[in-house]
Image (cartoon, grey):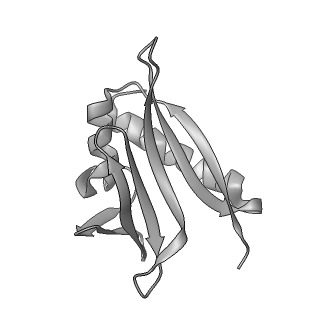
Amino acid sequence: MDVKVRYEIEFPINSSPQLLYQYISTPSGLSEWFADDVNSRGEFFTFIWNDSEEKARLASKKSGEKVKFKWVDAAGKDTEYFFELHILVDELTKDVSLMVVDFAEEDEIEEASQLWENQISDLKHLLGSV
């Protein structure tokens, strides 16, 4: 398996940080834009897309600011890969944006970024931020 590299993308979002946080930190919020369905049991989240599912552990969260999910392997052990959703608020303009930190193989970063753009577009529609 190729080594994955970290990348970051920032998306301006016209929303309050509090509302946005509900969509990035709860199974019900995430299932509306990120995956077809999201289940959680304690700190473990199961993300379901079509016929595939991936498990992740909620590694950290800071209320109203960010969440970090660490992917886990079949045995339930943390892998070295994660994705983080970080709400940024510009101190002067109060503009809100969502910073996505994720990993992909070098030759798949463009494709992975496009996938995030599509998902964030769905999120913006839910928030009325288009």
Quarter of the picture holding the C terminus: top left
Q: Residue at x 30, y 50 (%)?
A: 25
Residue 21: where, in percent of width, then height? 31, 40
Q: Residue at x 24, y 54 (%)?
A: 28
Relative vertical location of residue 26 with respect to residue 18 in this rendering, above or below: below
Residue furthest top as drawn = 92
Q: Is residue 97 left or right of residue 113?
A: left
Quarter of the picture holding the N terminus: bottom right
Residue 97: where, in percent of width, then height? 47, 30
Relative vertical location of residue 108 with respect to residue 116 in this rendering, above or below: below
Which residue is more in the foreground, 84 or 46?
84
Quarter assignment of residue 94: top left
Quarter assignment of residue 17: top left
Q: Residue at x 26, y 43 (%)?
A: 22
Residue 103: where, in percent of width, then height? 61, 59
Q: Residue at x 26, y 58 (%)?
A: 27
Q: Is residue 31 left or right of residue 82?
A: left
